[in-house]
Image (tube, grey):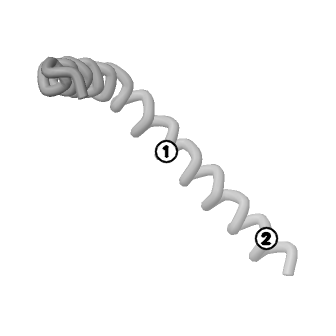
Amino acid sequence: MPSNSNGLDLELNKRARLLKSLFLPQLVEADRRRQNENREERTHLDRDQ
């Protein structure tokens, strides 16, 4: 193990947090859209029965 592994881990964690903060709103919106689509599909399936 290199002696600077903790520093590298901290740097990766900082980058991961930054990426999450940048992309989280898009992920939340995509998830909400997918849930709405699933709900609409279930409604159509219920009507077809």
Q: What residue sits 29% from the left and 25% below the top? A: 16
Residue contact at pointers 1 and 2, CB within 8 angstroms: no
Q: Position of residue 7 (x, y in %)?
A: 13, 19
Report the front residue among 19 and 35: 19
Report the front residue among 4 and 49: 4
Q: Which is in the foreground here, disc 1 or disc 2?
A: 1
Lateral position of residue 6 relative to residue 18, left or right:
left
Classify the position of the C terminus by image quarter. Answer: bottom right
Real-space CA distance between mark 1 and mark 2, rounded to the nearest whole angstrom = 21 Å
> Which type of secondary structure does the marked residue at label 1 adopt?
helix
Q: Relative to 26, is 37 above or below?
A: below
Q: Position of residue 25 (x, y in %)?
A: 35, 30
Disc 1 designates what residue?
31
Q: Relative to 1, is 48 above or below?
A: below
Lateral position of residue 31 relative to residue 3, left or right:
right
Q: Relative to 44, is 10 above or below?
A: above
Q: What residue sits 47% from the left and 45% below the top? A: 32
Q: Amino acid at mark 2?
A: Leu
Lateral position of residue 28 relative to residue 10, left or right:
right
Disc 2 designates what residue?
45
Classify the position of the N terminus by image quarter. Answer: top left
Residue 47 sits in quarter: bottom right
Mark 1 vs mark 2: which is more N-terminal? Answer: 1
Q: Position of residue 28 (x, y in %)?
A: 40, 39
In the rendered structure, find residue 7 and report the number of the disc placed on it: none
Residues packed near mark 2 inside 10 Å, few (<14), some (14 to 19) or many (20 plus):
few
Q: Amino acid at mark 1?
A: Asp
Residues packed near mark 1 inside 10 Å, few (<14), some (14 to 19) or many (20 plus):
few
Q: What residue sits 67% from the left and 57% below the top? A: 40
Q: What residue sits 21% from the left and 19% below the top? A: 8
Residue 27 sits in quarter: top left
